[in-house]
Amino acid sequence: MNPAGRQPRVVISGLGFISSIGNDATEVARSLRELRHGIAPFDFFPGHEVDIKVAGTIKGFDTRSSHHAEWRWPERYAFGREVLRSLPPHGLHAFCALEQLIADAKLTPELLADGETGLFTASAGSPFLQRERLNALHESHGGRMHPMGVVSTIAGTLNFNLAPHYRIRGAVCGFVSACASTAHAIGYACDEIRLGRQQRIVIVGAEDLTVESTYSFHSMRALSRNPDPATASRPFDRGRDGFVGTGGAAALLVESAASAAARGAPVYAEILGWGQASDGYNMAIAEPDGRGLATAMHRALAAAGVAPADIGYVNAHATSTPAGDRSEIRAIHTVFTAAGARPAVSSTKALTGHGLSMASVLETGFCALALRDGFTPGQAHLVDPDPESAGLNLPRTTLPSAPDYVLKNSSGFGGSNVALVLRRWTA
Amino acid sequence: MSGDHPISEKLRGTLRGFPEATIQDCAAFQATGDPAAFERAVLGLVHHHLSPKPPKPLATYPRSTALVAELGLDSITMVELVFIFEDLFAAKLPQEELLQVVTIDDLLNLLRRHLPAPPPA
């Protein structure tokens, strides 16, 4: 609570991106406006013909080696051995995204270390690096244990590495709800700030793009087998056949409006509220009618004090899987169509691919850019809409104006659903 | 820096990212068992792990210089060094003896005690 006894307003006041559609906010905003995708041929098993042929690739980086001395990244970022030694590939991306956020939000080393700044992160860890380290351990019968084998590979590696480097002394923890992880992180960050426990919380999501992190989803037939980068990820289209994997990192600053204003930080959008609900249905498949997601959206709208008709844009979770997209379509009908509301709906995963635990912070960042810059991302790659989407407003091109209110959906394995409500910023 | 000695693929792999001079010193010691190359190699390996780097070359410091208290080596970095030493020198360094290491000299002596016999001259 602030001194007047009112809850502080919460805003997004800094962004950073290392993504398949751009390695900074300017490039990302341009890709969103022009619906320029970042999907490209990707050789998961060089020299072998395999089912999955494309991914949302990160340009300007090479992190294929398990040894950081062989990594390459843009010259504008300078990191020494003492930073790199305990990072997985996606850790490098996370550091770069956070460097962008710090500059964007005008955060000083003193503010980062003042105890009023927290850090909430999510990644699946690095099964790629873990496999290397554990193989060496097994092959040596316990004799060779890489000193950084644990901290560079397990879920939580982003916290372990980022918090000490930036001397972050506020609330630091990680979130594990698969593809809803960073939506949970943003929601709970809002709560921390509203409760007066923190002034600002940095959200960082990142993932490796590797055989181990990405191709492994093919084991449950979740990935698109379509070899065409221009159509492999096509949420809501009748021809969709699975998601396209991506990696990289996204960083977003959640902050009290007063704290951001005091520093003259850029304000992209206000976060009005959030809601969550679980399907209680299946470890991997979304509940067919999207009841959990619909409940999460209803709770987010109630928390925000906003009616369905107020929402101008829904940034969908839709990953381009047949069952998942259908479930979300039904959830959107339940919340919006049934209330006579017809917001624009699109899934930007058509452009990026699916960033797993990073996806929510990446896409909330997209919504923040759209609200600040005045546009609404269209639904790329939609040619033949799923018949169940009849009645939904799926604009095929980017709209030249921003809505007043945005709802962002996220869903993860086990049926975890989160919705966030954002508003165009007015002081 | 030592003269030209063949550098094995394994040595290159272990020392990815290290200065070329240190790699050469390690190769020279592996080929000849030369005590001077050994010391240069060890000091080069330690220097590479220090952050921030000391203002002067490590060889100019007294051998009584404390690794932790004066050079800022922390315990996890010491474990990284041990990981490298064990790989390079095919030695197994007992934990109880490692805990006794305080100075540069202590480290050199510990390694000397556990090095395999030098190659025949």
Image (cartoon, coloured by chain):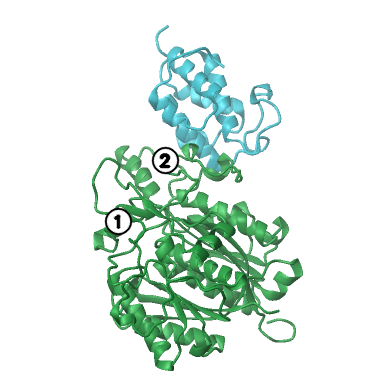
Chain colours: A green, B cyan
Picture residue at 69% right of the left edge, 86% below the top: A6
Is A86 situated above or below A4? above
Front in this rendered view, residue A145 or A130? A130
> Which quarter of the figure has residue A286?
bottom left
> Which quarter of the figure has residue A100?
bottom right
Tag 2, which secondary structure?
Answer: loop
Q: Chain of mark 1?
A: A
Residue A97: mark in rendering: none
In the image, is B17 to the left or to the right of A350?
right
Residues indicated by labels 2 and 1 sit on the same polypeptide chain: yes
Check the image and name the residue furthest to the top: B121
Picture residue at 71% right of the left edge, 58% below the top: A108
Spatial CA span between label 2 and label 1: 19 Å
Q: Is residue A35 among the parts visible in the rendering?
A: yes
In the image, is B56 to the left or to the right of A318?
right
Tag 1, which secondary structure?
Answer: helix
Tell me the amino acid under the disc marked 2. Answer: Ser
Q: Position of residue A250 (x, y in %)?
A: 52, 60
Picture residue at 34% right of the left edge, 70% below the top: A383
Picture residue at 56% right of the left edge, 40% below the top: A81
Residue A65: mark in rendering: 2
- Determine whether label 2 and label 1 are within 8 Å by CB: no
Quickly name the residue at label 1: A216
Is A127 situated above or below A222? above
Check the image and name the residue furthest to the bottom: A339
Is A99 situated above or below B58? below
Tell me the amino acid under the disc marked 1. Answer: Ser
- Number of numbered discs visible in the structure rendering: 2
How many neighbours does mark 2 have within 10 angstroms: few (below 14), some (14-19), or many (20 or more)? Answer: few
Give the quarter of the figure containing the N terminus of chain A.
bottom right
Along the polypeptide, which appears first: circle 2 or circle 1? 2
In the image, is A352 to the left or to the right of B109?
left
